[in-house]
Amino acid sequence: MNQKKRMLSGKLYKVEGKELYEAHKKAKDLLDDFNSLRYEAWHKHKYILDELLGGYGERNMIVPPFRCDYGENIYIGNDFFANYDCIMLDVNTISIGDRVMFGPRVSLLTAAHPIDKVIRAELLEYGLAITIGDDAWLGGNVTVNPGVMIGEGSIIGSGSVVTKSIPPNVIAAGNPCKIIREITDKDKAYWQKLKAEYLAASE
């Protein structure tokens, strides 16, 4: 098993070898192109991200600057939005569903290092996949740690550090991130009322 296969399977590996080097270099070149796009050339952004990422849906927006390790291990659905300074360390798979929103400076970190200092000093590392469900919303400066799954429809409060998986349809926040409460039909009714007021005022 080569280093890339070890990396993607969650085993200890070293960042070495032609395959990982070339994948990393391709990503950095494409990121340079993406992050240097002028506003009037913004129509080119999807062509770059289609080539950079493993999967990139429709009607998406990633606001530069954006950083990742390889890109090819990131899979994003449709109607995704990420604000400034998004970081995705994709030494393992990052899967993001449809209609997901990120505030500024969200970090998805699949990369991890051994607790044992001797092994860590040998530059061995590993990565665990991250999954973000449909309709999730991560506030600004949220950090998602290796191996975490965030359930469909859940909201993660700004500044949270998500160390454990979060179930669907809850509001969670803190360091470490903990569930505050469920999202209920009462929430839906409240926001539907505000929408109706908005529509009435727009007539």
Image (cartoon, rainbow, N blue to C red):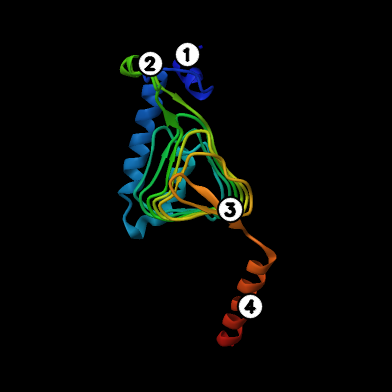
**Mark 4 touching mark 2, by CB under 8 A?**
no
SS at mark 3 in the image:
loop
Residue 136 locus on image (x, y percent):
56, 53
Q: Earlier in the sequence, mark 3 or mark 2?
A: 2
Residue matched to label 2: 17
- The answer for how far apart the CA atoms under marks 3 and 1 are is 37 Å
**Type of the residue with mark 4:** Lys
Q: Nearer the viewer, mark 4 or mark 1?
A: 4
Asked whether residue 107 is in view, the answer is yes
**Type of the residue with mark 1:** Asn
**Type of the residue with mark 2:** Gly
Residue matched to label 1: 2
Image check: 76 left or right of 106? right
Q: Earlier in the sequence, mark 4 or mark 1?
A: 1
Numbered badge on residue 193: 4
- The answer for how far apart the CA atoms under marks 4 and 1 are is 56 Å
